Amino acid sequence: MCLVIIDINNSSKKDGVIIKEKAKALEMYSPEQGQTHENLLIHFCKTRVIYLLVFLLACIGIFIFKDYLLFKKLYIFLDIGSDTYNQVYPYLVNISDYLRTEGIPYWSFYHGMGQNIFPGEITNPFNLILYILGSDYLPYGIAYVELLKIILCGIIFFYYLKTLSLSSATCIIGGVLIAFSGYMVLGSGWYGHSAFIVFGIFLLLSFEKLFKENKWFYFPFSIALLASRSPFYVYILIIFLLIYSIFRILIEGRYKIKDACILYVKLAGASILGLAMVAPFLINDLLRI
């Protein structure tokens, strides 16, 4: 609300009227205006709180991985994490070169005396980024991909906590803690473990979206991503999800058997759809199991 004060001074002359007006406006501050600005700030914080989380994750991640991001060091290890140097890095380079020279990986004589390497984890979106970089630039991109996993882990867990109707502060703290948890940071030194955490948290979010909001289309993608790592991971996490879902049903007080049956039918259908999405790429893994 604004209060405007106008002071007008008129003067006139004969043989032509000249009207001279002098106006001065003073805008006075109103408490309602300050309250409106405060409400806008609160609304912005509530609706844009995800930006604060991303900022925190990026700042902490850049500080931790600065030597790798600035290419002073490579995110490849020779000590207790020597698997990255002896096994994982050569595998990534082999697949990257194979994709550029031959196409979809099938058989490679660079694995032992020769073996089937299909599908070469081309269904893993994080590995695809490294393959696109090519074998020359691949080692320099590993740290950036691992930082991306950490940030995504925090963001997905933030939205998972949001579906549980927790406060924004709790969701931010939870996102930061899970992103820089011991297993996530240490597991990123083996590359595959960090991806498993990201996909596993996405599975939890997908379940909650189906359970609380009846949005099923996230769930098939979470199953497909897990299967892209290994069908064995799907087996492990489906068992965990069955136990988790029982506790969620009890907590929410949905005791009707009919509702529980409908939920599990939806989960089964979405899981089958997710497996069907990547079925052609699972044959070799299933044979190894």
Image (tube, grey):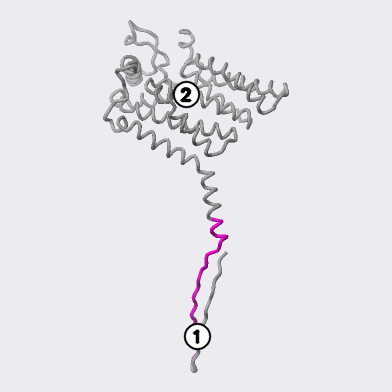
Secondary structure under tag 2 reads helix
**Which of label 2 and label 1 is nearer to you?**
2
Please give the name of the residue rendered at 47% of the width and 16% of the height, measured from the top-left corner. 230
* 99 lies left or right of 249: left
Q: Per the image, is 26 magenta?
A: yes
The quarter of the rendered structure image containing the N terminus is bottom right
Of 102 and 199, which appears nearest the observer?
Answer: 199
Q: Amino acid at mark 2?
A: Ile
Q: Magenta span: helix, strand or loop, mainly?
A: loop
Q: Amino acid at mark 1?
A: Ile
Please give the name of the residue rendered at 58% of the width and 26% of the height, measured from the top-left corner. 207
Q: Which residue is mark 1?
A: 19
Residue 209, compared with residue 191, is above or below; it is below
Which of the 4 image quarters holds residue 2?
bottom right
Q: Are marks 2 and 1 in contact (CB under 8 Å)?
A: no
Q: Per the image, is 34 magenta?
A: yes
The location of residue 74, given as percent across then percent down, is 29, 25
Residue 14, compared with residue 131, is above or below; it is below
* 25 lies left or right of 191: right
Residue 189, compared with residue 19, is above or below; it is above
Q: Which residue is mark 2?
A: 197
Mark yes or no: residue 94 visible: no
Please give the name of the residue rendered at 50% of the width and 36% of the height, measured from the top-left corner. 172
Q: Residue furthest bottom?
A: 14
What segment is highlighted magenta in the picture? 16-36
